[in-house]
Amino acid sequence: MQPAGTGHIERLPSGSYRVHVYAGTDPLTGRRLRYRQTVRTKRQAQVVLGRLLEQADEGRRPDTDVTVADVLARYMTLAELDPSTRNTYAGYIRRTILPALGSMEIRKVRGPLLDNFYARLRRCGDPTCTGKPFTEHRSFPGLTIEPGNVRSAWRRVSAAIRDAVGTGQLAPGEQLPSVRELAAQHGLPVAAVRHAFEELAREGVIAVHHGRRATVSGGPSPAPMPRPQAGDASHDCARAGCQPHHCRQMSPKTIRQIHAILSGAFAAAVRWEWIDRNPAGSAKLPKIRPRSPTSPTPTDVAAVIAAARDQELDLLALYMWLAAVTGARRGELCGLQWADIDLDTGLVHIAFSYFVRDGQKMRKDTKTHQDRYLAIDAITAAVLAERKQQVQALLDTTHVKLPPTAYVFSSDPLGLTPWNPDWVTHKVTEVAESAGVSFNIKALRHYTASQLLAGGIDLRNTAARLGHGGGGATTLRHYADPVSEVDRRAAAYLAQLTAHTATSRAAQPAGLPSQGR
């Protein structure tokens, strides 16, 4: 084996001299590390050879040809990330970063290059977009529903999508047509397509997002099928639902998330001595406009819960009630077991969250990696006790006892499998729309925060109930209603104080109505 710190001089056809010095093997990538430098004369080559040999003996790394894709792959392997965070990062890397920067050598990445990359994303979130018109070819499978067989239409739709995902025809992260678009293209009932999407979301095959298209779940496919191309005789654009590309700007918040991934990976590359400095440190990030959080009113929450009961979705109504009372996250409630609820003392132990991604279903720790005990009132405890008695009464017919590890929110009486959080999001939004209320599952956390602060509960306890860290900064910035009831009372107090002072001095400003007018 060639020892480290050896080198030679090569004469090139042009007459110049190239110096090669072997500097060992990179323990992370297994690649051979070499210094290379080209000079004009043999004398210069001998001087450079001595200098490079000295650098190799000192253990200084030469310039590397490691690419951005190599760095990201190693970073994702070693980084300690929450499963949901890892899934989110993997999606951004697969869809946005690798197509644009993946093949570039990391030593050539600079702040101005990242500035241009972020500017392109602000114009269009598709990294392959060049600004010229093109067609977005989809690989959605063709659907054939026999006339008169509408009753099984949702089964056929779900089976076709499931098979397409399994064979790699639909790649992970790929967007599906909307429910109405799919129904119109194939002459299917909207309810059948919606039912198919619900079942696939429950299984974890697809992820349903409120206000956005559903996407295929999962990591990189082991053998993805080639993407359809223009002129492919086997591809029918009309049947697949191909559409002309329309540029959609990527939000500053999303661009900052992509920057955080690159910055973390480049920082790791600095530690591994692949590069000398983090190029993301000099990149300019887009400004985020302050977003005013909004929360539903108590009337809205009551209307949606009542709509769920009217549709005989009593367990979903209980889910929303508990979400409003506790402020727990959707995954935390889906992962709630009867063993976590002490009905006698009125306490709910939030220590786990249910997670479904990449076909993986697991009960993991909470988003902030901390557990908390939440008090519940007598009414909530009574409703939960009634639900538990109903389930046990159903099991008594089969002489089975409800296990303590049974999930509270489950579609089977034994509570073996909890609800999929994505399915809950879709179902709550659907019930809210039927009630004529603009509402989603996360709005219940906004509701909890706003109502607690308006009711005089201090910020520290409000943040603790919602599971927020940072002394309540997250609660105020993202969850509290910007115009709370406390602020309205403050405005009324100031108005009364000012009016009283003005009246007592009989010195009202011009244009201000006098008393009695």
Image: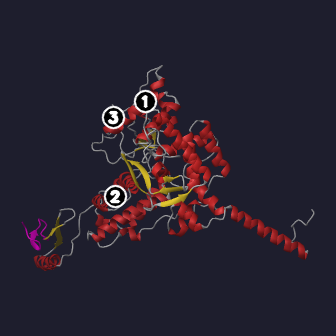
Are dots 2 and 3 in contact, CB under 8 Å?
Answer: no
The boundaries of the magenta stretch are 1-21
Outermost residue to the left: 1
Q: Nearer the viewer, residue 477 or 39?
A: 477
Q: Give left or right: position of 360 versus 328.
A: left
Residue 427 visible in the shown view: no
Nearer to us of marks 2 and 3 is 2
Tell me which numbered mark, 1 or 2, is placed earlier along the sequence.
2
**Nearer the viewer's eye, disc 1 or disc 3?**
1
Q: Residue at x 46, y 36 (%)?
A: 395
**Whole-percent x, y for residue 67 in the image:** 27, 61
426 left or right of 400? right
Q: Nearer the viewer, residue 450 or 169?
A: 450
Q: CA distance from mark 2 to mark 3?
A: 28 Å
Instruction: From the top left corner, tell me how far across and down residue 356 is, in percent.
Output: 40, 47
Q: Which mark is residue 155?
A: 1
Amino acid residing under circle 1: Arg
Which residue bears the numbered disc 3?
232
Which residue is pictured at 62% across the width and 40% down the height?
Answer: 307
Kindly give the residue lying farthest to the right in the view shown.
516
Residue sitting at x 89%, y 75%: 504
Asked whether 10 falls inside the magenta stretch, the response is yes
Amino acid bearing label 2: Leu
